[in-house]
Amino acid sequence: MSEESVPVYMQDNPSKIQRMFGDYYLEYASYVILERAVPHIDDGLKPVQRRLLHSMERMDDGRFNKVANIVGDTMKYHPHGDASIGSALVTLGQKKLLIDTQGNWGNILTGDAAAAPRYIEARLSAFAKEVVYSPKVTQWKLSYDGRNKEPVALPVKFPLLLAQGALGIAVGMNCLILPHNFNEIIEAAIHYLRGETFELYPDFPTGGLLDVSGYNDGTGNSRLRCRARLDTSTKRLIRITEIPFGTTTESVIQSIESALEKGKLKLAKIEDNTAAQADILLHLPTGVDVEKTCKALYAFTECQVSISPKAVVIQDRKPVFMGVSEILKANVDNTRDILRRELEVRLGELQEAWVQASLEKIFIEKRIYKVLEQSESWENSLAQIAKKLAPYVAEFIRPITEEDIIRLTEIRIKKIAKYEIHEAEEHIIDLEKQMEQTRRNLAQLTRFTIRWFESLQKKYGEGRERLTELTTFDSLTRAEAAVENETLYIDDEGFAGYGVKKGQAIEKCSTMSDILTIDSHGVMMVRRVQEKFYVGKNLLDIRVLRPGQDWVFNMIYRDGKEGTSYAKRFRLGGFTREKEYQLTQGTKGTRIFFFSVHATEDDSSAIKVNVFLKNQLKKLRRPIPFDFAKLRVKGRAVLGNIVTKNPVERIARAMAAASTEENEQQEATLTPVPGELTSQGTQEKPEKTTTKSEEATGEGEQMSWDF
C-alpha cells in the first residue's frame, strides 16, 4: 500500500486503529458473555429469560396470556427483537417447570417447532410464583432505555440452573450445563445444609441410559455417554423407546439410514410411531443377529452420543468455571441468604404492625382521642396526644414519631365507636407470636432452609421421578460393532482387500476391520482394511483381527546367513497401525524355517517339530526333535531360545503316528524348501504351502507354514 492510499487518521499513529478495534472487540465479547449467552449464578437465568419472567409477573392475573403479548411486553426490557424472545419463551415452556403452557408448544422428541406466538398461550406456574419472585428483596436497575425498572437478578430460592440446564455460545467460550432431577436436587441441597456428602447426576426429559463414570462433577474435562433404550423382547424387532439427550427421533432415524447406506448394519424396515413417547421400530431381516445390530446402532448412529458438559456462570460480573457441586452449594447459600432477607423484612413488617396496633389500642382505650375536641390548634393537639401517649410507649421497640400520631388522628369515628378491645388484644398477641416465630427462624436459619426445601419437594416433587437410568457401558469401538458383510480376498499379484474379487477368499470382515500381515521377511504390520491394498506376494500369514482374540504364534528362524537358529512363542501385543514390526532380529540373510498360528496357548504348546541338519549322510540322518511346550509365551520382540548352532537344512512337523521316513516323505510332498534370504532381504523364488486344520473363523484355528 502506497503512502498516499493510507487513510489520514492512520498516517500519524498507525496503531490507533488497532487499539480502537481491540477495544471494540473486547466490549462486544464482554457484552455477549455477560448479557446474552451465559447464565447468572444467583438465579440461573440468562438476561432474556430473566426479562421474560419479569414481564410475565407484571402481566400475571392468573389467566393465560398470548405469547405474542408476552413477547411484545418483554421488548420493553430486551432490545434484541421478538424472534429471540419467542424462542427463549418456548424453551422455558418446554422445560415444564416455571411456565404453564396452552396450545402447540412443539415436541422435544420429534423436534417439531411450536406454533406461532399468536396461537399459543402461557402463564406463570405456581412453583414460579412461590420460588422466583420476592420484590422486597430484589435489586433493581433501569432498563436499556431508562423508562422501566428490571431486576439485576431474580431472587430465586432454588437451584434453578441445575434443574433446567443451560446452553450458550459466547465469544471464546461455551457453556453446557445439563439438567438434573428436581427431587435429587432438593435431596442434595438438604444433604449439603446438614453437612453431609452428596452426589448429583444429570437427568434428561428424553430418558435413555446414561454412563456417568466420566462425569467429573460436570467440569470441562467431563465426558458422558448417553444411549437410547432398546427393547429387544420381540423377535426380529428392535424398538427404540427412549432417545439420548440432544437428539430427536428424526435425527436418530437419519443417522440409522446413513449407517444403512454405508453398510454398517442391516435392517428390513424402519417405522416411526412417536407421539407422546418415542417409538421407533426397526425390523430385522432373516438371519441378522439382534445383539450385533444393537452394538452397531450404538457405534454408528445417534443411539449413543457423547456429551462433554462445561459449566460456566456469571459471578461478580465475570465468567467463572464451576463444577455442579459448587453451583449447588452457591445456589443453596443464595437461597438461605434470600430467606434470611425475607425473614428480616417480614419481622420488620410485623413489628411495624404491632406498633400501629398497640398505639391504636392505647389511643382508643384510654380515650386520648378526646384531646382533639379540647385543643385550640392542630399543633397543640399533636403535642397533647404525644404527652398522653408517653407513659404507655416508653418500652416500645421504636420511638413514636409525628407521623404515627397523625395516623392516629385519621382514625374514623365509626371505627372508634365499634372498636373491640378483646379483638384488638388477640390481634396484638397473634402479631407477637408471629414475631417470635420469625426470630426463631432467623436464629435457626439453616433448619428453616431445610424445611423450605422439604416443603417444595412435598408440593411439587410428585411426578418428577428420574427418567434417565444411570448405568455403566462396556467400551465399544466402531470396529467391534461393524457388521462383517464383506469378504477379505488376496490375489496372486500381492493385492488384498474386500474389493479383490478374483483372489482367494480369506475370511469375512467389515469395512472397519483391522488386518494382520506377516511376510516371509518376518515383518509384521496391522492396517485398516481397504477395498484394495498391497501386501506383497510372500506372506506367512494374513488374517482379520477381532476383539477378544489373543493369537499365539510359533516361529523358528535362523539369525543371519549362517547364524544360530532360534525358536520362540509370542503374542501379538500392542501395535500402531501402518507401522512395521520386525519379528526376527532383522539381520540380512535371515531365514524363517517354521511358522504357525494358534487360537490358544494350549494349541501352540502341542506343536512338535523335527529339525534336520545339513551335511549329514542320508543313511545316518537323524532329526533333532523340538517341542514348543518347552517355551514360555513372551512378547514378539524377544530373541527366542536356541534350537541349534549347526546349519539347518529344513524343519518338519512331527507326527506321532508316523515314522521318520514317513514324516520326511509327507513334508517333502507338502512343503518345498524356499530359497535363502538375500543381502537385500528378499527371497529367491519362494514357494509357500498353507495348511489349515480348521476353518479360519473356528475356535481351534491353526495355520502353519513349514519350510
Image (cartoon, rainbow, N blue to C red):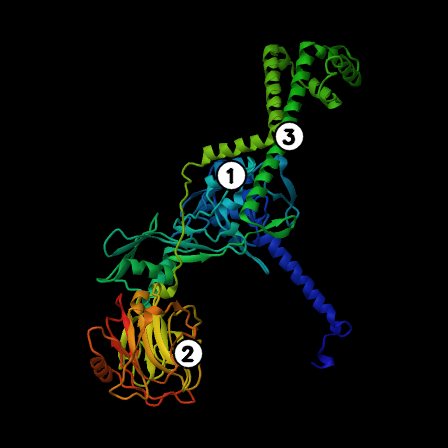
> Which one is closest to the eye, mark 2 or mark 1?
2
Quadrant where the N terminus sits is bottom right
Q: Are marks 1 and 3 in contact (CB under 8 Å)?
A: no
Q: Which mark is residue 584?
A: 2
Q: Nearer the viewer, residue 157 or 573?
A: 573
Q: Earlier in the sequence, mark 2 or mark 3?
A: 3
* 3D distance between C-alphas at marks 2 and 3: 84 Å
Residue 64 in sight here: no
Residue 158 is situated, as x and y percent measured from the top left of the image, at 54, 39
For residue 396, side relative to residue 129 (left or right): right
Q: Which numbered circle lies on residue 128?
A: 1
Q: Residue 418's x, y, as percent?
A: 60, 11
To which quarter of the image does residue 414 belong? top right
Mark 1 is surrounded, within 10 Å at the Cα level, by few (under 14), some (14 to 19) or many (20 or more) other residues, namely some
Q: Which of the image's four quarters has the C terminus?
A: bottom left
What's under tag 2, amino acid-wise?
Answer: Thr
Q: Mark 3: few, some, or many residues within 10 Å (few <14, many ≥20)? A: some
Under tag 1, what secondary structure? helix
Point 30% across, 60% down: residue: 293
Which of the 4 quarters of the picture holds residue 350? top right
Mark 3 lies on a secondary structure that is: helix
How many numbered discs sit on the rendered protein?
3
Whichever of callouts 2 and 1 sits on the residue coming sooner in the sequence is 1
Where residue 344 is drawn, which disc sits there?
Answer: 3
Tell me which corner region of the image, top left, top right, bottom left or bottom right, holds residue 691: bottom left
